[in-house]
Image: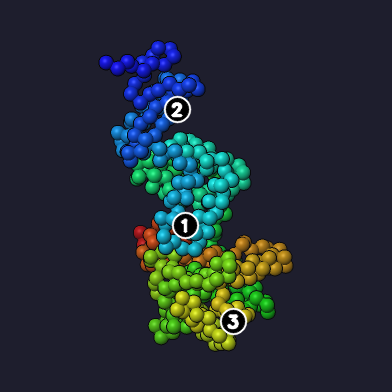
Amino acid sequence: MAEKRKDKKGRILKDGESYRSDGRYMYRYTDIRGNRKCIYAQTLSELREKEQLIQRDLQDGIDYAAGSITVLSLVKRYIPQRQGVRYNTKVGYNFVLNLLKKEDFAYRQIKDIKPSDAKQWFIKLHDDGYKYSSITTIRGVLRPAFEMAVEDDIVRRNPFSFRVVDVVPNDSVTRKALSQEEKEKYLAYVLGDKCRRRYYDEIIILLGTGLRISELYGLTKSDIDFKERRIRVERQLTRTRNCEYYIEKPKTDSGERYVPMDGAVYQAFQNVIENRKTPKVEMLINGHSGFLFLDKDGKPKVAGHLEHAMKRIIDNYNKSHDEKLPRITPHVLRHTFCTEMANAGMEIKNLQYLMGHADAYTTLNTYTHSSYVAAEKAHAKIAANR
């Protein structure tokens, strides 16, 4: 019978265990792919604790060695599997990758990451000055990356399953719908300003339709049906940081829709078409041309054009008026439209359709903002019929 191997203390070593000349203990095993692997420890008890984990993981079909990859490596593995994503999503991926490369957390092995570690790291990012929205973007990449690892039997649980708001405060600026008084002051100022008056029709259309700004600038003349008094929404026009134009489908699958025109919107579109100067060369973008809204060079406008113009409008207004107006952006106009429709009693599923939302929850909880005046009117209407 072969003599059992022992360590320097005379303890019998199990199959796969050995005592090295450098004083460390080694355990050799075969992983689920048939590859030979080794682990090391300073003491025999420490080695056997690791052995137990390995055997447990092998029994559960988990690749112990794969769990040794870093958080950064996991994200790099996950991102290429996300094919056909939008440009803004790709920008978000690059933001997360560049941030991870600077963080010690990213170089830890994924098998060692616990929910408490992930939460502590988010707290650290918040203390470093990252906003709630940025941390939410980071979680939006790490959570599905770790979910992939769970599905592949690399780790047992997803350490990023918690809600960001339960860890760091939501310091995002809440968009508020404009009151009727604010809206009237704003529109009167824009219309009365010789320089900013050219944006009036675009603002009226956004206020009267709830379109996203990229949807508005993706419109061509063929999308405006004056006979049926409706707008066909089926694309977004945007531009990369390298000033390359591209077309995307609307933000959600529900984004392709028809939006009715009231009298003000109808007239605004007629003004736009009448005042549109035909450029020397109509740009062709992904098979589309004849975009309604052009800049001074005859090129299609993108969101930044109106966003910058609206910022200047508010800055100039607030410099010359004692009563200030809040920050007004194209998205605030969208909020205002949605809130006004909801307060007027539009059924939520119809409003969800007009807004192009994937679900009614977004319509109810993100875009509508009630007020005492609206609540009072609703209460009086119910009380009168009771």
Question: Gap in Å between the C-alphas at discs 1 and 3?
Answer: 36 Å
The residue singled out by tag 3 in the image is 298
Q: How many marks?
A: 3
Identify the residue shown where x is 45% and y is 27%. 40
**Looking at numbered disc 2 in the image, what kind of residue is underneath it?**
Tyr
**Looking at numbered disc 3 in the image, what kind of residue is underneath it?**
Gly
**Looking at numbered disc 1 in the image, what kind of residue is underneath it?**
Thr
Query: In the drawing, does residue 221 fall left or right of residue 153?
Result: right
The answer to whether residue 111 is seen in the rendering is yes
Residue 180 vertical placement versus 118 (above, below): below
Neighbours of disc 3 within 10 Å: few (<14), some (14-19), many (20+): some
Q: Earlier in the sequence, mark 3 or mark 2?
A: 2
Among all residues in the image, which is located at the extreme right? 320
- Say which quarter of the image contains residue 154: top left
Among all residues in the image, which is located at the extreme left? 1
Is label 1 in a helix, a strand or a loop? Answer: helix
The residue singled out by tag 1 in the image is 366
Is label 2 in a helix, a strand or a loop? Answer: strand
Q: Earlier in the sequence, mark 1 or mark 2?
A: 2
